[in-house]
Amino acid sequence: MATGLIQIYTGNGKGKTTAALGLALRARAAGKRVAIVFFDKGGEHYSERALLGTLGVEWFACGLDRIDPTTDRFRFGVIPEDIQQAEQGIAKAQDLLFRSSSSRGGARGGAEDAHERDLLDLLILDEINTTVTLGMLTEAAVEHLLDTKPGTTELVLTGRTEVSKALETANLPGKPWPDGNQHQRWLSYFDRADLLTEMHLHKHYFYHGTPARVGIDY
């Protein structure tokens, strides 16, 4: 029986990446092998990365640095280099799954057992949902990744599905979001999730003038 399920954390509220990092911590404490691919999160602004390696979590950051070093402002929008970075991210995720599933079809016995010990127990694709809705990756690319996932690897996909203003009027595929929020859409691969949690925004200190804080927000 396959034990690796598909979990999705989405919605416009804070806590999606935080939930995934908590799961990574729990998995490592249980001796499981964990890897994370961060999409659209280039730069050195993310405090958790200083600790992940010491916990034995492999991680790979793809994406340009969206914070302008001069103005300290966030860059919105998508440029060709963003798409290239996203494609590198999905290729890395595919490579991790392929590497972890290398024992399939192999010879029986000790060699296969050694490969089995290298299987990823948990792979987190952080911000991949946002990457898809902004047009940097296709839903089909994620569907293909799910098709190749080993049955024992737990796969976690995070990221809000809010689309940019330029895409809001486009003829987007998929069914409407259940809560009627037109700033989000149901991505095709959401149907394949074993768990889907939507984070709702009710309050956020950011809208009251509190800036993002090191060690709390990043």
Image (cartoon, helix red, strand yellow):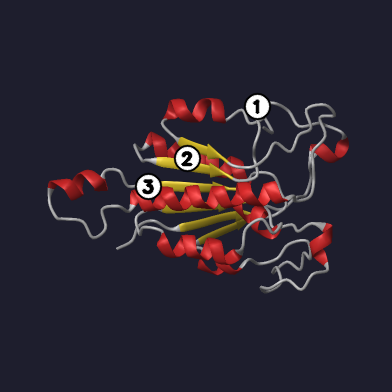
Name the residue beneath numbered marker 3: 121
Which of pointers 2 and 1 lies earlier in the amino acid sequence?
2
The image quadrant where one finds the N terminus is bottom left
**Residue count near mark 1 (Cα–Cα under 10 Å), binned few <14, some 14–19, many ≥20:** few
The answer to the question of whether label 2 and label 1 lie on touching residues, with beta carbons closer than 8 A, is no
Give x and y (percent) for residue 214: 69, 26
Q: Do the residues bearing badges 3 and 2 touch, measured as CB atoms within 8 Å?
A: no
Q: Residue at x 37, y 40 (%)?
A: 33
Q: Amino acid at mark 1?
A: Gly
Residue that extends furthest to the left in the rendered view of this protein? 109
Residue at the image point whose x is 19% and y is 50% from the top: 112
C-alpha distance separating marks 3 and 2: 10 Å
Residue 128 placement (x, y as % from top left): 60, 52
**Vertical position of residue 138 compared to residue 206: above or below:** below
Q: Secondary structure at mark 3?
A: loop
Q: Counting other residues with Cα less than 10 Å from the Cα at mark 3, is it few (<14), some (14-19), or many (20 or more)? A: many
Residue that carries the numbered disc 2 in the rendered image: 24
Q: Relative to 184, is 114 on the left or the right?
A: left
Q: Relative to the observer, which residue lies in front, 71 or 179?
A: 71
Which residue corresponds to the image point at 72% horizontal and 52% vertical from the top-left? Answer: 12
Q: Position of residue 208 (x, y in %)?
A: 87, 37
Label 3 amino acid? Asp
Vertical placement of residue 30 versus 44, above or below: below
* Closer to the camera in the image, 202 or 25: 25
Q: Residues within 10 Å of mark 2 (few under 14, many from 20)?
A: many
Q: Is residue 30 left or right of residue 176?
A: left
User: Which residue in the protein does label 1 denote?
Assistant: 215
Q: Secondary structure at mark 1?
A: loop
Q: Residue 173, image x and y in percent?
A: 68, 73
In the rendered structure, which amino acid carries the disc numbered 2?
Ala
Q: CA distance from mark 2 to mark 1?
A: 17 Å
